[in-house]
Amino acid sequence: MDLQLYAMTCGWLTMPMQTMIGGEEGNIKIPIPSYLIRHPKGTMLFDTGMSLKAQQDPAGFLGDASAFIQVNFANDEDIQSRLQQMDVDVRDIDMVINSHLHFDHAGGNAFIPDARILVQKDEWDAAHEPDFIESFAYNPEEYDLGQDMMLINGALDLFGDGSVNLVPTPGHTPGHQSLFIKTRKRQILLAGDACYLRRTLEEMKLPALVHDADQMLKSLRALKELEAKGAEIFYGHDPEFWSTVPQAPVRVL
């Protein structure tokens, strides 16, 4: 079996445009992506979307943030339903790679109880800091579930063949990571929140709120270097770009 990549939409969020690019006005409706990757040595997810709590009681789930964020999350858009639509059993998932542990990227981890969770150690540590947990974006009840954990320190060639690589891209959060996929024909960088939109990379414009602006700019420059070498950047929440991405069960790769 060659490497396979599938893209899934696990709901949408509507929020102020300035959360994507600082200083912008108006709102933007953004997709919540998750990816299924099949490799001869393992099947994995990159990010798991939101939990059912966001679907069932979005105002209660978001708390004060519900004043400026609207959840658009249908009954069949959670990660478990998306996998079922592909005839994939959650027990077939060997690993979950979380770009970071915010609610729209790790909220579906509970659906995959038997998988090993791969996250940067800096992210795991930050996601247990009281100051971060006080914000709505981190909630240990969504990711500290007693699952088998693999805490990563830096870059990692996951299978030792150069095809699936964890790439540290901090800035959005202390331990954000992206996923670099390389085959004989294509190179794809699943950016996560290291790069929200195409404009983020083209204009090097950061969101209004960011953990570390200098780190995020450094990560964006690293993405630009990969792009210059032929990598396709899959932006984290770009609705225009996302409309061009084949959706499962159609393969991206």
Image (cartoon, rainbow, N blue to C red):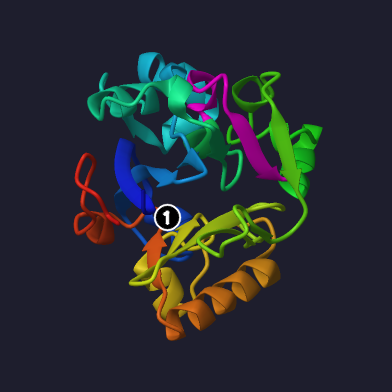
Asked if 19 appears above or below 117 in the picture, the reply is below
User: What's the residue at 44%, 70% (across, down)?
Assistant: 200
Q: Is residue 209 visible?
A: no
Quick check: 238 above or below 231?
A: above
163 or 227: nearer the eye? 163
* Residue 21 shown in magenta: no
Name the spot of residue 194 as percent of width and height, x first. 54, 60
Please tell me in which quadrant of the rendered image residue 127 appears: top right
Q: Is residue 152 visible?
A: yes
111 is within the stretch colored magenta: yes
Image coords of residue 13 (percent x, y): 35, 39
> Position of 81 compared to 135: left or right?
left
User: Vertical placement of 196 versus 103: above or below?
Assistant: below
Q: Where does the magenta region start and end? A: 107-120
Q: Residue furthest front?
A: 1
Tell me where residue 71 appears, x and y as whole percent. 35, 31
Disc 1 crowd rating (10 Å Cα; few below 14, some 14-19, many 20+) is many
Left or right of 9? Residue 204 is right
Residue in the picture at 21% in, 39% down: 249
- Residue 136, located in which quarter of the rendered image? top right
Quarter the C terminus occupies: bottom left
Going by the picture, which residue comes out furthest to the bottom?
228
Task: Provide the residue designation for mark 1.
Answer: 236
Q: Is residue 192 left or right of residue 212?
A: left
Q: Is residue 145 above or below residue 1?
A: above
Numbered disc 1: secondary structure: loop
